[in-house]
Amino acid sequence: MIVMVCVDNQNGMMFNHRRQSQDRGLRRRMCEIAGNDDGKFWMNAYSRKMFTDSDTEGTHAQLCVAEDFMKQAASGDFCLLETEDPADYAANLEELILFSWNRDYPADLHFTLDLSGWKQVETAEYAGSSHEKITETHYIR
């Protein structure tokens, strides 16, 4: 599976059971990435609430919702992981796409996956709808 995760400057992911931030442009970008291979784009109901029809319009992303989506996702499927640390699923990850807000937010859930065994293969920076700079970094094993 290919996991997408959003983090702040300190690798924070959530605070008080809520996402730190969101960005309309980033949601659209996630759907474009997942739709390139007509792939399934898995997430839980909490994450699904932020996606609108305009986020997926013109993409081939198939949004799939399940609370145990990390168990249901198959090889090559895309997953948006917001509410759990990807380190808990390290053995099943094929690729990681890390989106950085390039800001500091309060956090009580952090990204702790050790990336020393991963290879960075692509990095891009762009403006989102509410963030001046979002950094997108792709890692493979």
Image (cartoon, helix red, strand yellow):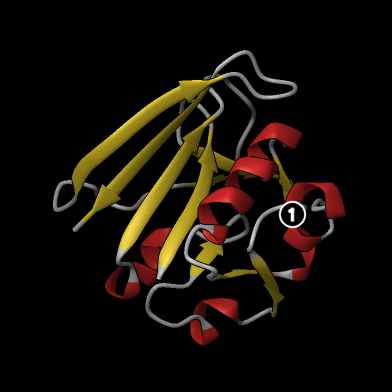
Report the residue at 58% width, 49% height from top.
Answer: 32
Residue at (63% x, 53% y) in the render: 31
Q: Camera-side residue: 6 or 111?
A: 6
Residue 89 rendering spot, x and y as whole percentages: 39, 71
Q: Quadrant of residue 35?
A: bottom right
Residue visible at 45% across and 22% down in the picture: 125
Does residue 135 appear to the left or right of 90 in the view shown?
A: right
Quadrant of residue 62 in the image?
bottom right
Tell whether 138 sits left or right of 117.
Answer: right
**Residue at the farthest bottom position:** 72
Residue farthest to the front? 58
Judged from this view, the residue extending furthest toward the top is 132
The three-letter amino acid code for the residue at tag 1 is Thr
| Visible residue check, residue 23 | no
Disc 1: which residue:
56
- Location of the N terminus by quadrant is bottom left
Q: 88 left or right of 54?
A: left
Residue 10: % across, % down: 46, 29
- Relative to 81, does residue 69 appear above or below in the rendering? below
Front residue of this view, candidates 112 and 79: 79
Residue closer to the observer: 79 or 34: 34
- Which quadrant does the C terminus fall into? bottom left
Residue 124: x and y, percent? 40, 27
Quick check: 12 above or below 45? above
The local secondary structure at tag 1 comes to helix
Does residue 88 show up? yes
Which residue lies at the image location 54% right of the left edge and 86% below the top edge? 72
Q: Residues within 10 Å of mark 1 (few under 14, many from 20)?
A: many
Give percent across and percent down for residue 80.
58, 59
Q: Is residue 22 above or below residue 101?
A: below
